[in-house]
Image (cartoon, rainbow, N blue to C red):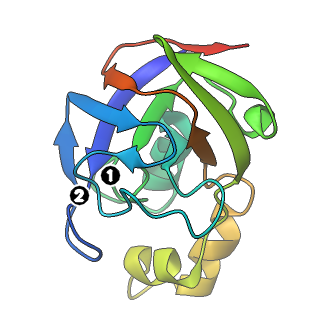
Amino acid sequence: MNIEHIFISLKIGEPQTESHRIEVVAGEGIKGDRNFGLSAYAGQNITFIEAEIVEQFIQNYSRAYDLSITRRNIITRGVRLNELVGKSFQIGTIQFLGIELCEPCLELGKNLSSATVAPKEIVKWFVHKGGLRADILSSGFIENGMAVEIA
C-alpha cells in the first residue's frame, strides 16, 4: 500500500507534471498546485486514485499508458481508497481525513472521450472508481514509495 506517482498542475487546464516529492500544508493543499489555498469545500486539498483503476480504464479503452489522465494528485497501489471515506489515514507523519469519493464529472468525461467513446460513457465507467478527496490535517513532505497507513 504505497504512493506510486504524484502529479500537480500549476494552473487550471494546464497539463499535469509528475513530481517525486511534494510539500503539503495543513488545510491549504499541495504547494505549487492549482488548488493550493482554495477551501470552498471539504476535500479540495488533495485527490487520490488507485493505479489499478486507471490501468483498468487504459486497458478497457485501449489508451496509451498514462496514469495522470484522471488529473488526480496521488496515485496509489494496493490501497482501497473507497474504504477511507470518513476515516483518518497517514503518509509518513502527515495526517489526512478521507472526505468523499472523487466522483467523475463531465469535464473528466470530455477529457477522456474519443471518437468511439462518448463523455457520458467515461463518466459512467468512473462512478465509484474515481478516487478520494481528502483534507490534509498536518504539514510535511510526500515522496513516491511512501506507505499509506490507515489509522
Q: Which residue is mark 2?
A: 16
Work out which quarter of the rendered image holds the N terminus and state it: top right
Going by the numbered disc 2, the residue's amino acid type is Gln
- Residue drawn at x 45%, y 84% as measured from the top left: 110
What mark, if any, has residue 79 been given in the picture?
Answer: none
- Residue drawn at x 39%, y 37% as measured from the top left: 25
Query: Which secondary structure, mark 2?
Result: loop
Tell which circle, 1 or 2, labels the residue nearer the N-terminal end.
2
Question: Quarter-wise, where is residue 125 in the image?
Answer: bottom right
Placement of 60 over or under 137, stated as above or below: below
- Residue drawn at x 45%, y 50% as measured from the top left: 59
Going by the numbered disc 1, the residue's amino acid type is Ser
- Residue drawn at x 47%, y 17% as measured from the top left: 2
Along the line of sight, which residue is nearer the eye, 38 or 63? Answer: 38
Q: Which residue is mark 1?
A: 68
Placement of 140 over or under 57, stated as above or below: above
Spot occupied by residue 78 in the image (x, y as percentages of width and height): 58, 20
Question: Quarter-wise, where is residue 140 in the image?
Answer: top left
Check contact, mark 1 vs mark 2: CB within 8 A: yes
Spot occupied by residue 129 in the image (x, y as percentages of width and height): 67, 52
Spot occupied by residue 144 in the image (x, y as percentages of width and height): 30, 21
Along the line of sight, which residue is nearer the eye, 35 or 1? Answer: 35
